Amino acid sequence: MRRKLPGDAPPSAAGVAGSGHASSASAPSEADLAQLSTAIAAGEDLGPFVRRAFACGRPEPLLASLRAAARDREAEIEELCRAHFHDFIRAVDDLRSLLADADALKGSLSASHSALLSSAAPLLASLESFLAARSLAGNLSSALASSRRCVRLLALAARANAHLHAGNHGLYLALRAVDAIDRDLASGPEPLPLPTLRRMLLSVVPAVRAHAEREISREFSDWMVSIRAASRHLGQVAIGRSAAARQRQEELRSKHRPLEECITLDDDGVGDLDDFAAAAATADAADGAAAASFDLTPLYRAMHIHQTLALGERFKKYYLENRKLQLTSDFDVIAATPFLESHQVFFSQIAGFFIVEDRVFRTGGGLTSRPDVDALWDAAVGKMVSVMEDNFSRMQTANHLLLITDYAALLSATMRRYGYPVGMLLDVLTKHRDKYHDLLLADCRRQVAEALAADKFDQMLMRKEYEYSMNVLAFGIQSSDITPAFPYVAPFSCTVPDICRIVRSFIEDSVSFMAHGGGGDTYAAVKKYLGRILSEVVDASIQKLVDTGSGLSVSQAMQVSANMSVMERACEFFTRHAAQLCGVPLRAVERGRRDFPLRKSRDAAEALLLRLLCAKADEFMRQSDGVNWMADDPPPGGNEYANEVIIYLETLTSTAQQILPLPVLRRVLVAVLAHISERIVELFLNDSVKRFNANAVTGIDTDLKMFEAFADGMSNLFVDSDQESAKNDMKAALVEARQLVNLLMSNSPETFLNPVIREKSYNKLDYRKVAIISEKFRDTSESYFSTFGTRGARQNPKKKSLDTLIKRLREAS
C-alpha cells in the first residue's frame, strides 16, 4: 500500500458498481485495463482493482495485466542500468584509490591514540584523586552547615530560655527567637540531621508560646485590677483640676469685673477670654499630667504579645468584654451606700474609667475603636442619667441637690475636654432646675420666718466697724458713704441683714447651679428666681407677719416699715450682685430695673403702722367724753385729748425721723391727721352728744389749731422742694374738721346752701352730716330758761340763718 497522491484518480464508478453486482459482472474491458495501467503508472492504490477482479471471479486478466506491467518496468530498469553503468565503474575505481589513504590515516590515528593514552594516565590518576577530595570536601561542608544550623537553633533556644527567665519584659524577645526556630524548621533546605534535636525543638516552640500567653494574660489581669483602683484616683484628680480651673475663671471674672464698666457693650467679656483660655489650658495640661501618671505598658505589652502570637483580634474582644464588666461593676458602687455619700466616688470612678479609655484609644494602636468607646460612654451616661433622676426625684434638701449637681457639672466639664458628649447629663441638671430652686425657696422661707420670729424689731446697735461692714456695707444699704461714729444705731433691725444674707446666699447658690449645670441664659434664670424669693418668700413672710401682727407695738410696726425702706436699697443690691456673679454689665442692669418687689409687704407695713397709730389716737380721743359740750366758757388751752394726742405725735415723730424715710413719715402723718379729722367730725355725730353750744365749738376750733400748728411744724422737716407740698397735704388732711368748725362758727351758716360758696369753702362736708350736727347745735342763749328773759327781743341773725340751714337740709333729705 503506498501513499495516495493528490493527482491520483478516485476509484472508478465502474469498480464501485461492480462490487455491488458481482453475480452479473462481465470480464474487464479494454477501458478497465487502461485505467489499471494509468493507476500503476501514477503509483495509485491498486486495491479497488484487485477487489473488483476477485469479486468478478476472474482475476486472470488482472494478473496478466500486472505481469505485463512488471515486464515493462524491468525493461525500463535495464535501460536505466545500461545508461549509468560507466558512472558506477568510475565510482568503484575512486573508492579503491581511497582505500590506501584510509589505511595510512588509520595507522596514524592508532599511533596518536597510543601516545595520548601514555601521556593521559597521570592526569587520570590526578583526576580521580581530585574527585575523591571534592566528594570529601562536600561531605565536610554539609556536616559543617548542619552543625552550624544546629548550633544556631540551640543558640536561639538558649536565648529564648534566657528571655523567659528575665520575666514578662523578655516575652516578646523569647517569642521572636521561637519564631526564628519555627521558621528554620519549617522552611529549611533539608530536614534537621538530628531527629532528637528536631523533636525537642518542635515540642519546645508551642510550649514557649503557651507559656508566654499564660504569663502575659496573668500580667494583664493584674493590670486590669490595678487600673480600676487607679481610675478612681485619676477621676478625682481630673475633676479636682476642673474645679480649680472653674475657681480660677471665677477669680479672673471677679478681677475683671470693675473693668467691664469702663468698656463698650460690644467689647464685654473680650478681655477675659484669653485669661479663661489660659486657665482652661492650665487645667488641660494638669489633666494630661494626671493621665500620664498611670502606666499602660502592661496593656501595650499584652496587646503586642498577642499580636505576635497571631491572637490580636481575640485579645481586642477579651479587653473590651473585661472593660464592659468593669464598667458594670463600677455602677454597683452606689448600691451599698446612699447616693449622697457615694456620688463623688461614683462619678470619679466613671471619669477615671473613660480617661483611661481615651488614652487607650489614642495610643493603643487600634486596640479600641471610636464606636466601641462611644458605646461604653452611652451606657455610662444612660446609667448616670437614670441614677440622678431617681435620686433627684426623692431629694428634699436643696444643699444635697446642689452638692450632687455641682459634682455632676464638674464631671461634665472634665469629660467634655476629652471629647465625650455630655448633653444628656446637662439636660438632667436643667430638668431639675425648678425642683432645686423650689427646695432652696423652702429653706429660705424657713430661715426668713425664723429671722422674723427672733427679731424684736428694735434698732440694731453696731459697736465695731467690722459689724458695720458685715451688716451694712456688705449689702449696700448704707444711706451715706461716710462711715459713722461707733457705737452706731442703725435705722433698721437685725432682720434686714439676716434677710439680706439669706437672699445673697440664695443668689450665689442659684448662680452656682445655673452656671455649672443649669444651662441657658444664666442671668435671666437667676433674675427670675430672685424675683420669686423676693415675692414668694420675703414679701409673703413679711406680709404674713404684718397681717398677723396683733402683738406688735407702734414702735415695732414703725421699725417694720423702716425695714421695708431699707430693703428697697437691698433689692437693688440683690440685682447688682446677681448681675456681677453672672458677668452682666451693671449698666445693662440699670436699664432694666423693675419696680420694688416688696411693695405689698411695704404697703401692708405702712397700713399696720397707720392702724396702730390711728388706734392710739382713738384711745386718746376716747377721752373726749370729758369734753363739756354745753360749757359756759370755751376751754382756754383746748381739750385735754388734743393735748395728749399732740404730745404723743410729737414724741412719735421725733423717733420716726431717725428711722423712717421722710416720704413714709409724710404719708403716715397725713393719714393720721386725716383720721383725727374724721374722729373730730364723728365727735359731733356721736349719739351721746345730744346738743352742743358755741363754746364747745370754740374748744374744738382750738384743738384744730393745735393740730394745724403741729402739721405746719412737721412740714419743715421736708426738703425745700417738698415743704410747701407737704404743708398743703397735711392741712388738707384736717380740712373736713376745719370746714365743719368754720361752718359752725360762721355768722351765716346758710351760705352752705350756696353751691359756689359750698364748693369753695365746704367741699369736703357731707350735707347729711351737716344736717345732723346742725340739729344739735344751739347757742348759749338757748338754754332751758333763757326764753323767759328774751321774750319779745329781736331774734339772733346767726340763729335765724342756722334755722334756715336746718330747714333746707331737712327738705333736701
Image: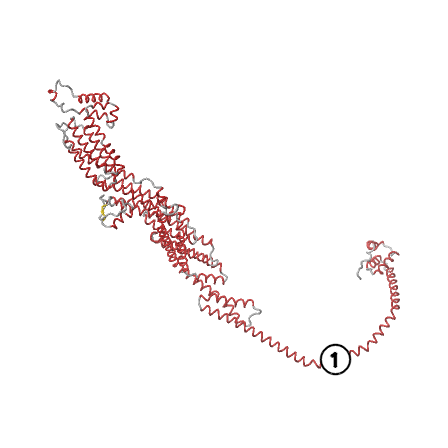
Q: Residue at 67% of width from left, 81% of height from top?
A: 122
Q: Secondary structure at mark 1?
A: helix
Q: Amino acid at mark 1?
A: Ser
Q: Is residue 529 above or below residue 135?
A: above
Left or right: 584 in relation to 607: right
Q: Is residue 181 above or below residue 61?
A: below
Quarter-wise, where is residue 344 in the image?
bottom left
In the displayed image of the protein, which residue is found farthest to the front? 720
For disc 1, the marked residue is: 112
Residue nearer the viewer, 567 or 720: 720
Left or right: 18 in relation to 270: right
Quadrant showing the N terminus: bottom right
Residue nearer the viewer, 435 or 491: 491
- Could you tell me residue 760's position as x and y percent? 25, 26
Q: Is residue 636 above or below residue 123?
A: above
Quarter-wise, where is residue 763 in the image?
top left
Left or right: 141 in relation to 661: right
Quadrant showing the C terminus: top left
- Could you tell me residue 779's position as x and y percent? 15, 24
- Could you tell me residue 428's position as x and y percent? 39, 47
- Could you tell me residue 722's position as x and y percent? 27, 36
Residue nearer the viewer, 120 or 650: 650
Residue nearer the viewer, 73 or 273: 273
- Give the colour scheme of this rendering: secondary structure
Left or right: 343 in relation to 780: right
Question: Around disc 1, counting alpha carbons within 10 Å, would you say few (fewer than 14), some (14 to 19), or many (20 or more)?
Answer: few
- Say how many tags the image has: 1
In the displayed image of the protein, which residue is found farthest to the top? 792
